[in-house]
Image (cartoon, helix red, strand yellow):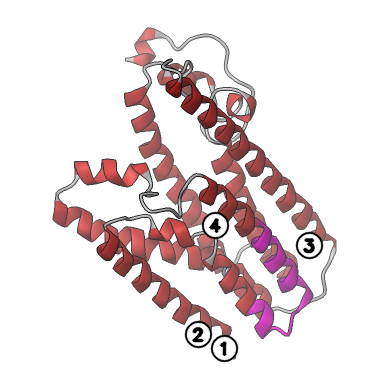
Amino acid sequence: MNPVMVCLWIFAAVCAGTWLLSLITREYSWTDRIWSLVPLAYVWVFAVASGFEGRLVLMAVLVTLWGARLTFNFARKGGYAPGGEDYRWAILRQRMKPWQFAVFNLAFISIYQNIIIFLMTLPALTVYQNPAPLNAGDWILAVLFAGALAGETAADQQQWNFQQWKGQERKSGRTPTPGFLQSGLFRYSRHPNFFFEQAQWWLFYGFAVAATGAWLHWTILGALLLTLLFMGSTVFTESISRSRYPDYVQYQYRTSAIIPLPPRQGLRPAAEAG
């Protein structure tokens, strides 16, 4: 079979399906709901088409572990339940005219995001086109991928524990203080889960390098676009956080945005805060 054509048919079906479901249900998180599932299909298509070539099977197994973890975390937050829409879409709808959001839903949520999902798995295409035995670089990448997976798991668990605590505080009639997580991994990065998520897909691209010995392939585009997507998402998410929590500005001042780093000491000067 031609794995690229199979993946393109999957891509077309997913784009159409997520868009139509958003129109039917008036919920706009259908791409979020398939985000952890469709990459598994793409990579396993290449693995099967290769006759289960070792490097592609290793890549597919790693992506399966990534998808299982992300699916579990999304499910426990209620993402698959009715009404489990990402809160940011509701805020964005308030800021846009209905026709503007309709265009955004089709072009960005249902098509562009699915383009990124497809592209970030295409290092598997480079590997498929350049079959070669596994080498030490592959196992180093696999270990680093597993480490990033563990890091994201820890960050999401810390966020989950914090949100559960906030919910209990509100049920008890108390105002949760602090209002946002600033400890654990979040002491060193405002978005450690974003960091580890992106790291996994840059490492995934590394398998194309291990297969060919060349550092640059066009299939780097997926990891690059994913990083740009997270940059935009971070700016939007933090604009919401600043509007909800006055002390978030100081957190931004002392804590790295994405890459975990030692926290900065002191308070943000008033001139900078303005």
Q: Distance of mark 1 from mark 3, alpha carbons?
A: 25 Å
Q: Which mark is residue 197?
A: none
Left or right of 237: which side holds 120? right
Image mark count:
4
In the rendered structure, which amino acid carries the disc numbered 4? Ala
Measure the alpha-carbon separation of dots 2 and 4.
21 Å
Q: Quadrant of residue 126?
A: bottom right
Q: Which residue is mark 4?
A: 223
Residue type at mark 3: give it. Answer: Asp
Whichever of callouts 2 and 4 sits on the residue coming sooner in the sequence is 2
Magenta residues, as a range?
Answer: 46-65
Q: Secondary structure at mark 1?
A: loop
Q: Residue at x 41, y 60 (%)?
A: 31
Label 3 neighbour load within 10 Å: few <14, some 14-19, many 20+ = many
Between the C-alphas of marks 1 and 2, the distance is 6 Å
Cα distance, mark 1 to mark 4?
A: 23 Å
The location of residue 59, given as percent across then percent down, is: 70, 66
Q: Which mark is residue 138?
A: 3
Prevalent SS, magenta region: helix
Q: Nearer the viewer, mark 1 or mark 3?
A: 1
In the foreground, 78 or 9: 78
Whether residue 213 can be seen here: no
88, 53: nearer the viewer: 88
Amino acid under disc 2: Met
Q: What residue does disc 2 label?
A: 5
- The N terminus sits in image quarter: bottom right
Residue 2's disc number: 1
Horizontal side of 159 relative to 212 (left or right) equals: left
